Image (spheres, rainbow, N blue to C red):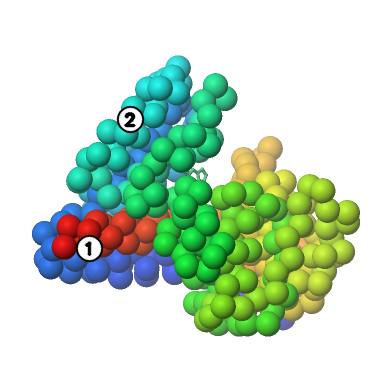
Amino acid sequence: MPPVILDGKALAERIRGELAGEVAEFRDRTGIIPGLSVVLVGEDPASRVYVRNKENAVKAAGMNGDVVRLPAETTQEELLATVDRLNADPAVHGILVQLPLPRHLDSRSVIERVDPLKDVDGFHTMNVGLLAQGHPRFVPCTPLGIVELLKDSDVDTRGAHVVVLGRSQVVGKPVALLLLQKGVGADATVTVCHTGTKDPARFAREADILIVAMGQPELVKADWIKPHAVVIDVGIHRKADGKLCGDVDFAEAAQVAAKITPVPGGVGPMTVAMLLRNTLHAAELAAERRG
Ligand code: GUN
């Protein structure tokens, strides 16, 4: 039987439509228009595309979106001053500093400078700590999108063995933390593999749900996958022939998996939808503080 394709594009569109309604209701109730500021340093072509997508999505949801574009030579002090200005601006509810930053900049200190109540990326130590303790406030967008996609596809995570390939701060670690929480859409048993893992394929083959975020094109083949497993592919790469692919060899995996995300059109669009949700959440927190 061919696998069920987990259509992140369609789900993201539905969520974005629902969020536009919630934004309108929030605006009518509070007079506040949620605002997201994205900071983009330099000219990385992939980052420019991602940032344009985010800006368009924010505006389509009825929120204010602006992009602060800084030259590649921006100094650490200048970038921190930009973050300070956005922290102090009451019309800005969410701040996202697009990563990766140019090499001469220290992303850790920039992330820590973002007001944790405006940290819609969920990368600040305070938000990572809250998630680790089981009291999430802002959760990184890609992990949130993965969990939402699993829920919508009726994948039962309770008691499932989830194997995560990759331990990044952006995907691997937070998705592991999210899925091992107590409660609906979580309660999984989680194994995290990384570059130090001996024979990751051995662990992958034990997975009921395999989440792949290793950043290596088409590394995961059919023999990494347990028959009828659910496969979530977070990778996106451009091949020599110009086509896009993920970290999973889709044609092979589709022979074995019960459910699988495509690339493109799987996890990627969900990330943008979750950014909108986090931005509305940030505006709600600001409204509560205002009283
Ligand atoms: N670069 C790639 N993914 C992300 C993300 O989720 N947030 C930020 N800030 N930068 C990224």
Closer to the camera: disc 1 or disc 2? 1
Q: CA distance from mark 1 to mark 2?
A: 25 Å
* Kind of element beneath mark 2: helix
- Tell me if residue 150 can be seen: yes
Mark 2 is surrounded, within 10 Å at the Cα level, by few (under 14), some (14 to 19) or many (20 or more) other residues, namely: some
Mark 1 is on which residue type? Glu
Q: What residue is pinned by disc 1?
A: 288
Q: Is residue 17 left or right of residue 160?
A: left
Report the residue at 47% width, 52% height from top.
Answer: 126
Report the residue at 45% width, 35% height from top.
Answer: 110
Q: Quarter of the image for the C terminus: give it.
A: bottom left
Is 260 placed above or below 247 here? Answer: below
Report the residue at 56% width, 50% height from top.
Answer: 170
Mark 2 is on which residue type? Thr
Q: Quarter of the image for the N terminus: give it.
A: bottom right
Q: Position of residue 148 (x, y in %)?
A: 49, 70
Q: What residue is pinned by disc 2?
A: 82
Is 88 placed above or below 14 here? Answer: above
Task: Residue 80: name its quadrant.
Answer: top left
Mark 1 is surrounded, within 10 Å at the Cα level, by few (under 14), some (14 to 19) or many (20 or more) other residues, namely: few
- For this orientation, the residue located farthest to the top is 73
Task: Residue 191: name its quadrant.
Answer: bottom right
203 or 174: nearer the viewer = 174
Q: Which mark is residue 127?
A: none
Q: Is residue 102 left or right of residue 31?
A: right
